[in-house]
Image (spheres, rainbow, N blue to C red):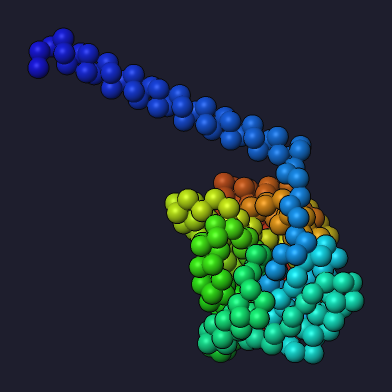
Amino acid sequence: MNFKERIKQSGRRMLSIILGVLVFICRIIFAFLHSLYRCVIPCPPKAVEGKVILITGAGHGIGRETALRFARLGARLVLWDINKTDNEQTAEDARNVGAGACAYTVDVSNKSAVYAAAQKVQDEVGDVDILINNAGILCGELLLELTDEQIERTFGVNILAHFWIIRSFLPRMLERDSGHIVTIASLAGYFGTHRLVDYSSSKFAAVGLNDALRNELRMLNKTEIHLSVVCPTFVSTGLIHNVAQRILFKMITAEDVAEAIVYGVQRNQRHIFPKAGIQSRLGIMLNAILPYRVNEVLEEAIGITIGSQSKKQL
């Protein structure tokens, strides 16, 4: 190859690189403008009437409130909870507003129980359209005050159960290229919190599960299976108390979270931050870029105190 040919080849490579960079920049700009557009004009809500929605931890709190809201929209509910009495009450209340509802008593930390219940749902109800992994527990103790069993239970309910449940219902979603998986995580999945070492760790895992699974589905070109991760601040379910009303985050209710879940699911929102969207995103961004001493000042200003009242499934 002579000198002129080498020059031409180098020029073609350089042109290809420049064009590639320009295309990349244009895609970034388009994606950014589309995001801004959706901030102003949200997606129209998708209908959930007649859709089969499975909610874990449906007996009380966030799960119950979410179930009742979807019931009013005409969804068919499949309700899982370890507490049979509370779960059946939620199902009865859903039927009273005209929705179909089936209650199953399930300990989601028990892999065998999950697989058995999932098969029963498939046989008795059919395909699940929307899966909401809501069940969770919180102990609220210092790390060295936790027992081994409490740590294992936290991870069993808060994250391992998500794997067993998703693995039960995802295959049919893949076959249909249709579905929606909702992960109820927490802002504790972005910020490590004292007295919540086990809980925060499990919620970090839940956020990671959602993000990694989304990428996996994208690589499989399954564009119609939507994923949402819900990251509330401090929810007044009796598990967390004495949260100072300062700066970024305030105590919210299970009703607030349920309202945000229904709104976000209907619009296929990827990240749902109930009642504190801007503050939550700002907090996550600041936590990532600010020096750790500055973050410590912010954490002290938030003023969270964790009680030790729980040890039960949410």
Residue 11 coordinates in the image, percent (x, y): 27, 16
- The quadrant in which residue 126 appears is bottom right
Residue at 40% in and 22% down: 19
Residue 31 coordinates in the image, percent (x, y): 58, 35
Given residues 94 and 287, the one toward you in this image is 94
Residue 52 coordinates in the image, percent (x, y): 70, 68
Residue that protrudes farthest toward the left in the picture: 1
Residue at 77% in and 77% down: 101
In the shown orientation, is residue 226 left or right of residue 52? Answer: left
Up the image or down, 301 lies above or below 57; here it is above
Residue 301 appearing in the image? no
Residue that protrudes farthest toward the top in the picture: 4
Residue at 70% in and 85% down: 104
Residue at 57% in and 29% down: 29
Given residues 198 and 74, the one toward you in this image is 74
- The quadrant in which residue 18 appears is top left
Residue 85 appearing in the image? yes
In the shown orientation, is residue 307 left or right of residue 212? Answer: right
Residue 267 coordinates in the image, percent (x, y): 72, 50
Quarter that holds the N terminus: top left
In the shown orientation, is residue 294 left or right of residue 240? Answer: left
Up the image or down, 204 lies above or below 112; here it is above
Quarter that holds the C terminus: bottom right
Q: How many marks?
A: 0
Up the image or down, 144 lies above or below 295; here it is below
In the shown orientation, is residue 60 left or right of residue 116? Answer: right
